[in-house]
Each structure stands twice: as C-alpha cells, then as structure tokens.
Image (cartoon, rainbow, N blue to C red):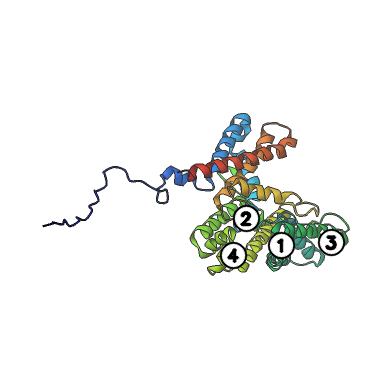
Amino acid sequence: MSMTRQAEPAVTPPPASGPKANDGRTTRRTPARRLLARPEVGVFLGVVVVLVFFLIAAPPMRDSGSMANILYQSSTIGIMALPVALLMIGGEVDLSAGVAVVTSALTASMLAYQLSMNVWVGVIAALAVSLAVGMFNGWFLMKTGLPSFLVTLGTFLILQGINLAVTKTVTGNVATDDISDMDGFAQAKALFASSFELGGVQVKITIVWWLVFAALAAWVLLRTKYGNWIFAVGGNKESARAVGVPVTFTKISLYMLVGFGAWFVGMHQLFSFNTVQSGEGVGQELIYIAAAVIGGCLMTGGYGSAIGPVFGAFMFGMVQQGIVYAGWNPDWFKAFLGVMLLGAVLINLWVQRTATRR
C-alpha cells in the first residue's frame, strides 16, 4: 500500500530586522541637501566671500554711505536682471535688453521735448514702445521658431541703429536735450530717480523698487500658476503645451516683462541725468544675463529663482565699487567680472551635484 504525502505550502521567512534596501527613488534628503538644492545658495556663498574680501581690502566700504552707493549700483543692474532671469528660466535670452533701456529713455525725452508736452506723455509713450519691442521679440520668436539668440541679436542691431540715427536727425546731436525744466519733471523724478534719508544716509529710490520687484517676482514664481508655466516652458515647451500650458502667451509675456524692466531703468536714467546719450546701453545686456547666471539661472532654461539674481546684481555692485574704494585700476573691472562669472558657474555646478548626490 503506497502512501502519498501532500506538498506543504512554502513559507517565506520574515525579513530580517535591520535597515531596508532603498533604490534611491524614495530617499529623503536631509535639510542641508534641500538647502543646497536652492538655485541661490551658490551665489549667496560667493557674495559672502566677496564681501569679506572687500571689507578687508577696501576699508572705505565699511562706511554706511559706501554701502548705500553699492546698493544703488546693484539696483540699476538688478531691476533689469530680474525679468531677464525670468526669461532665462523660461528658456530664452534677450540680447536687446541693454539698448532697449536707451530706446525707452530716448523716446520719452525726445517726444516730450520736441512736442513741448508734459514729460508724463513721453513716459507713457516710452512704456508703450518698450512693451511693443518685447511683444515683437516674443511674437517673432514663436512665429518663426528661430533661436532667441538670433531674434534678439537682430533687434539689438535694429534698436542700436535707430537710437543713433533718430537722435541725430531730431536733435542734431548724439544726445537729447535737457528736460529738467519741463512740466511734470519733478513728479517723474520723484518716482524714478529720487532719494531719501535713512539713518543719516541718502538712499536711492531704485533700491526700494528693486526689492519690491524681487519680492513680487519670487511670489509669482513660487506661488502662482504663471510661475509654473515659466518653469514648464523652460524645461520642455512641447511637453508643457501637451498638458495645456499656453506656451505662446508665456513666452511673449516674458519678453514684455523685459520690456517693462527696460522702460523702468530707462526712466531712471533719464530723470537722473536729464538727458540721454544715444550710443549707451551696448554691452549692458551681457551684464544682466551674467547677473542672472551668477544667480543660479541656467542658460538651458527650467531652473532658477528670483532671489539668486538679486545676489548676483549685488555682487556686481560690490565689485564695481569695491575696486574703486580699494584704489585699484578700474580697467580690471571686466576681467574681475569674467573670473567671478566662471567661478560662480563652477560653484553652482558643485552645489547642484552635491544636492542631488545620493
């Protein structure tokens, strides 16, 4: 009589106690890693190093009045660096930003002076022109599909030629006429180029506007649907379009924001000096882009912040004034900026790799 045995079900032993294996996808980053992942961390560290260096090398920088001058220089760069940074996060660049500032100032000055009108008429007309230039850049970019480098390089050359040719034709000179005695000048100067006393130090109003614009840009990027659109179109515009992001509207509006920044800085220059040189602005677009890059924005788009360019502009202001306070040859300024730019890029790269390392 044969007997058969039924197979018993296999029993899997319970896993041994101890740390579980992790494939890396659910790794929780430490607070330090999360902090390093912020785009502005690298430039903040650079700002601290440069500030300490110049406080030692240039004793006049320790004075509160000197710091006010540094903040003023930083603000004139920073106001434009903010919209340029947003545009870069959106995946584009604008090489016409520098001459667009001068175009805005020339428009306001010549229109008001030649037609003997209140300067506010020129200010409003300049705003319309600046927004139109930005709209054209964005529209032409989306219509043709050309790289933004080529589109805005063409706009740069067009505006540079118009600035010089129209100014010479209208005024017979390379600069506009003095508008300081015209109606509305005092009110416009109070808005764009005034100063106030704070702790015995004269503080330029542009510093206040710079910080206000920075806070507004940070809120838009981090707290609004439009901020999500900016990151989406900068990361991959086709994927963004597939999920319903209005790519064309976002790109055009970003260029119009750059136009708004150019208008504001142009008005500051006009009402600070009462006249405008038509050949200025060339090369400033590189300063704005560099401030954004130093602030952690990637040229490839989809990554960056609004606070980083604030630190980037502040670093530029420190270097520009620090060289003067240290008594060095100012011809070294651009060389110093180039070294600083390369150093900031390397620091940003190290910070990102450290933050994402498992």
Give the percent coordinates (x, y) of residue 6.
17, 57
Q: Earlier in the sequence, mark 2 or mark 4?
A: 2
Q: Earlier in the sequence, mark 2 or mark 1?
A: 2
Q: Secondary structure at mark 4?
A: helix
Callout 1 secondary element: loop
- Residue 178 in sight in this render: yes
The residue carrying mark 3 is 166
| Residue type at numbered disc 1 | Leu
Q: Regarding mark 3 in the picture, which secondary structure is present there? A: helix
* Spot occupied by residue 154 in the image (x, y as percentages of width and height): 77, 59
Marks 3 and 2, how far apart at CA: 31 Å
Give the mark nearest the N terminus, 4 or 3.
3
Q: CA distance from mark 4 to mark 3?
A: 41 Å
Quick check: 251 left or right of 153? left
Q: Out of 155 and 175, give the one closest to the viewer.
A: 155
Q: Are marks 3 and 2 in contact (CB under 8 Å)?
A: no
Identify the element where label 2 is drawn. helix
Q: Which residue is mark 1?
A: 146
Residue type, numbered disc 4: Glu
**What label sits on residue 98 in the rendered view?**
none
